[in-house]
Image (tube, grey):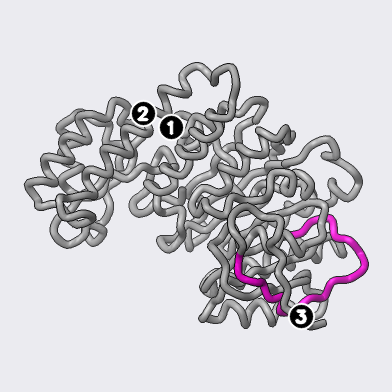
Amino acid sequence: MLAQPQDTTGWRIGQPHPPVTLISSRVTPDRPILSVVTPVLNGGAHFASCLRSVRRLADAVPGAIEHVIADGGSDDETFALARRAENDAGSPVSCVLAGPDRGQSHGINRAVAVSRGDWIGWLNADDVYDPRAAALVRAFAVGEHSDVDVVVGRCRFVDRSGRVVFAPVPPRLETAEPLLRPLSRWFAGRCIVQPEALIRRSAFERVGGLDEGNHLAMDHDLWLRLFEAGARFTTIDLPVAEQLVHPGQKTADNIGVAAAILRSCDQHLSHQRGGGFAGVDDELAELRKRLALVSRVLESPRGVAPFSRQAAHAAMQDVVDRITQPSGVTLVVGQIAWDHARSAGWDLSRVARSSPSAVPPGGMDAIVMDCLGGASSGASPG
């Protein structure tokens, strides 16, 4: 069935958006248990694997899963892959949305708006579901987890060869404290990875969905706002998803991710009455200091441009000398940073040097915060 263009964004955060076109829909009378939403823009390199993983999951739990795809205007093979999947017999793809969006968060919100499941799963184009996630959907079908709003399983980060490079453990959210400690918890592997979490629709809508002005750490912000709204979280030891680590992903921008998480923490604390948790303010102040120091390396009197080599030496030495907890900064880019970290007595077993090609022309160096807490060479998967 080909539906008419419609605006599906009225209830969301922020200013009015361009209208969304519902390109296709195969909505059936039956209500699915889980709606998987996938925002995508030029994701053709990985999108086919994402589609196959949702299809496998749907085949394992017939009739329980729909897949809603929001394409923000791809000009590669992504849109054709979505339409082909939608037309396959037995495909879980129920809706394909197309048209300009205001970023990933808006794409997710508009996909949720046309979905129908009681539970929402958010799977990016470079994520895949683990087949064992079918057990969780079956649990929903028989009424398990009826007393919670967010169920968090396990997600592994894998490289292109399938090697596991990071396997974080989600925190138990009895309080918001684990979300407010980015250095000692979140970036140290005690975090919630977005595809491993399934969210009750009513809770997602109660907080207005994702903040469409947040483009790098919208998931962390969502968990905080859900917690503020009284949502109940539970963690289970079940493999739910895998996230591919590759240089093109947004979360490779570690500095941007750290800054976005800091803003969400500050905003949450500004809403609280009666103070926060002991040590949280100090930890956030340390992160704020590190971001300020790193920004000095990335700036020059002319704006965003490489330092001269002499200036880079001076700035990097200042950064290294003033970071009081070097174990939290585990990825060093460039020879200058490496030399200064070594002379400062840092434990270099926790420091990975990037390849020389990663250093921009002119010899500019930078320290990059690594969300893994134990990096391998190259960009962190965040």
Marks 1 and 2 sit apart, C-alpha to C-alpha, by 9 Å
Rendered view: 297 above or below 89: above
Q: Quadrant of residue 372?
A: top left
**Residues in magenta, as a range:** 17-35
The disc placed on residue 183 is 1
Rendered view: 163 above or below 336: below
Rendered view: 344 above or below 201: above
Q: Residue under label 2, please give it.
A: 286
The disc placed on residue 31 is none
Label 1 vs label 3, nearer the camera: 3
Three-letter code, disc 3: Gln
55 vs 290, nearest the viewer: 290
Q: Is residue 238 magenta?
A: no
Tag 1: Cα neighbours inside 10 Å, few (<14), some, or many (≥20)? Answer: many
User: What is the secondary structure assignment of the residue under circle 2?
Assistant: helix
User: For the point 71% across and 38% down, which residue is it?
Assistant: 236
Q: Residue under label 3, please give it.
A: 4
